[in-house]
Image: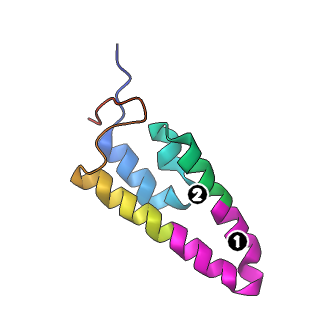
Amino acid sequence: MENNKQKLVAGLLAIFLGCYGVHNFYLGYTKKAVIQLVCTIVGLVLSILIIGLFVVIGIWIWAIVEGIMIFTGKISTDAKGNPLV
């Protein structure tokens, strides 16, 4: 039996928790999720120097774009190749 992931869940995770890579963890894209999580943490730490805010904003935009791509079908499978339902 296939373990299909839901498009709605993945898209909402990307929009609301995407900075932390939660949607990529959900879809099985662990490497990309860890990159987003680490960049967000580093950005938050560096936000005392102002430059970190740009990192966090960049990661947030990346996550919003991925959320839109999930909803529009540009990202239509999980890491194992199973279609999003």
- Taking the spot 22% from the left edge, 54% from the top edge, the residue there is 72
| Magenta residue check for 65 | no
- Taking the spot 30% from the left edge, 56% from the top edge, the residue there is 69
**Residue located beneath label 1 in the image:** 44
How far from the left and from the top, in percent, is residue 58? Answer: 52, 73
**Residue located beneath label 2 in the image:** 36
- From the image, which quarter does the C terminus lie in? top left
- State whether the magenta stretch is mostly helix, strand or loop: helix
What segment carries the magenta color?
A: 39-59
Q: How is the image coloured?
A: rainbow
Quadrant position of residue 45:
bottom right
Q: Say left or right for 47 vs 53.
A: right
How far from the left and from the top, in percent, is residue 67? Answer: 36, 57
How far from the left and from the top, in percent, is residue 32? Answer: 54, 49
What is the three-letter code of the residue carrying label 2?
Gln
**Circle nearer the viewer, 2 or 1:** 2
Tell how many labels: 2
The earlier-in-sequence mark between 2 and 1 is 2
Q: Residue furthest bottom?
A: 50
Q: Is residue 7 above or below residue 69?
A: above
Q: Say left or right for 46 vs 58.
A: right
Secondary element under disc 1, as helix, strand or loop, is helix
How far apart are the alpha carbons under marks 2 and 1? 12 Å
- Taking the spot 46% from the left edge, 60% from the top edge, the residue there is 16
How far from the left and from the top, in percent, is residue 8? Answer: 31, 46
Q: Crowding at label 1, few (<14), some or many (≥20) Cα neighbours within 10 Å?
A: some
